[in-house]
Amino acid sequence: MLEIKNYVRVQSLAEAYELCQNRSNVIIGGMLWLKMQNRSVDTAIDLCDLNLNHIEDKGDEIHIGAMVSLRELELNSILDQYTYGAMKESVHNIVGVQFRNLATVGGSLFGRYGFSDVLTMFMALDAYVELYHGGIVSIQEFATMRPIPDVLIRVIIKKRPQRVVYMSQRNTKTDFPVLTCAVSQMNSSYTCTIGARPLKAITFADENHLLDESLSDESILNFANDIAQKLVLGSNLRASADYRRRIAKVLIKRALTALREGNHHAY
């Protein structure tokens, strides 16, 4: 059972940061994961008055506030056009519409959950997060940082020539993913991000330059085998490590094939 002793709608980021220095206090976000925990919270910190629920096109950057809902990520035209529909694909299978209307970007990212579709997607976009105290850090670095008492303000996507494809494997449509996969091309470089291993997402570059010449069937297969071999995978109730390795090869091949064919919306 969740017990909350005090509830505060903070009026500034400074107030939120000061309160969260007490580890018995917690920023509640959409409060969807929190309510399933068995714990006692001294002060629940609500950021809803801080105007962090907007997605803004800043010209060379896209800013996504921490209180933006997953449903807004799904429906936003700016993100849909920039990611060729991959952002929508990354979130539209998360539980259901009612859940996505409440779940927030900040809540989905700050916990660095191993099952997070959202973390996989933003890592594939090479995004950044802005923290009140920690400043702007790459999401790749943020994903490996130890948990710290800070306030996630927004996610920053730096616009650049890129294409991205997102895929996932689920046992049932709205279940947590068995594996997530996002392949992106930035300029002439390719990366592959794999999440729900069931560990947190990790990004691989094409270090062996297997895709330098072309996205041929052979180079795609070689790249998929190379990444699948490097992956550290685990087993849980949803799938074994061996099954995840087999699925990783399939998803990587499908994603790169979709990228080659320009079929970004065919999942």
Image (cartoon, rainbow, N blue to C red):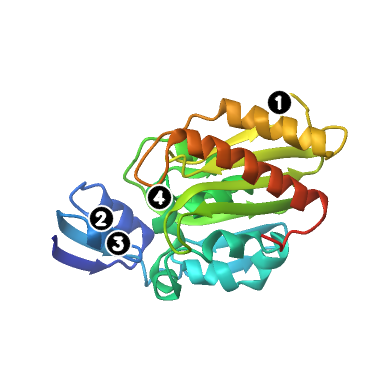
Q: Amino acid at mark 4?
A: Phe
For the question of whether residue 158 can be seen, the reply is no
Quadrant of image for the C terminus: bottom right
Three-letter residue code for mark 1: Glu
Name the amino acid, label 2.
Answer: Val
Q: Which residue is mark 1?
A: 207
Q: Tell me if residue 108 can be seen.
A: yes
Q: CA distance from mark 4 to mark 3?
A: 11 Å
Q: Do tag 2 and tag 3 residues touch (Cβ < 8 Å)?
A: yes
Q: Mark 2: give few (<14), some (14-19) or many (20+) Cα within 10 Å.
A: many
**Left-right relation of 120 to 241:** right
**Distance between mark 1 and mark 4 Cα atoms:** 29 Å
Asked if the residue at tag 1 contacts the one at tag 3, i.e. Cβ–Cβ closer than 8 Å, the answer is no
Circle 2 — which element?
A: strand
Please, is residue 214 above or below residue 152 in the view?
Answer: above
Residue 28's mark? 3
**In terms of sequence position, does the residue under pointer 2 or pointer 1 come before the other?**
2
The residues bearing labels 2 and 3 have C-alpha atoms spaced at a distance of: 6 Å
Rendering quarter of residue 235: top left
Q: Amino acid at mark 3?
A: Ile
Q: Mark 4 or mark 3: which comes first in sequence?
A: 3
Residue at screen point 35% across, 56% down: 14
Secondary element type, mark 4: helix
Percent of width and height locating residue 206 = 71, 31
Pointer 4 residue = 110
- Residue 44 located left or right of residue 178: left
